[in-house]
Image (cartoon, rainbow, N blue to C red):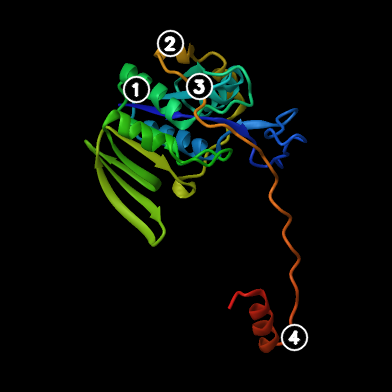
Amino acid sequence: MKVLVPVKRVIDYNVKVRVKADGSGVDLANVKMSMNPFDEISVEQAIRLKEAGQADEVIAVSVGVKQSQETLRTALAMGADRAILVIAADDVHQDIEPLAVAKILKAIVDEEQPGLVLCGKQAIDNDMNATGQMLSALMGWSQATFASELEIAGDKAKVTREVDGGLQTIEVSMPTVVTVDLRLNEPRYASLPNIMKAKKKPMDEKTAADYGVDVTPRLEVVKTVEPAARAAGIKVASVEELIAKLKEAGTV
């Protein structure tokens, strides 16, 4: 079984995001970029499936700018077998929307015929949480989202998923699309020898046009602003004073 793992290049989660002075978007100049943390988890899970003998090949895919090859090399260094880079934009500020990404992934799935697609549940830059679900709909495959546990048994996948009320365990038919949550695993660090080996692993380079997908944005960013500063709290001397303050604020 092949496992396909889409990965996205995003601002590193340790970096404080800055908004451009003109409000046109996020400032990416001299900013550290890395793999989306949820995608790291999906890469790790795919590698674990291969190590357990449940997968034969792990293919990492990224859709975006040419610089995304760095993200794919990270996936290869972690243990993916090969990679596919789909160049869909020249400007690093252009974010390819989920529907366009899902259409490109569908074309790749049609070519590669994987038995499982493992996606991060969302990207930390736009938080849309839509690509995996859209891909499932386009493919007509089953889907399991927000996975915190995953077991493959024959033509079934047993997935424990995190929902508002706690944990829900479902069983879906293969092939399937699974989106992963934070508690599924702890991604490994790529060792230096594996980083060197990753440079020799195959990486195909394609364009969105090769798959006949139009990536023209359907959404327009009108303005980007930083969140308002959090107001300072106050201390109260008694429960009565607390209730009075809450009444003044209209909270109770």
Q: Please state if 19 lies on the left or on the right of 161 as rendered.
A: right
For image coordinates 35% across by 51% down, the residue present is 160
> Mark 2 falls on what kind of element?
helix
Q: Is residue 54 visible?
A: no
Picture layout, residue 96 above or below residue 166: above
For label 2, the residue is: 210
**Mark 4 or mark 3, which has the lower sequence index?**
3
Q: CA distance from mark 2 to mark 3?
A: 15 Å
What is the x, y in percent for residue 120?
A: 46, 38
For label 3, the residue is: 216
Q: CA distance from mark 4 to mark 1?
A: 63 Å
Q: Please state if 53 lies on the left or on the right of 223 as rendered.
A: left
> Mark 4 falls on what kind of element?
loop
> Mark 1 falls on what kind of element?
helix
For label 4, the residue is: 237
Picture layout, residue 245 above or below residue 111: below
For label 1, the residue is: 109
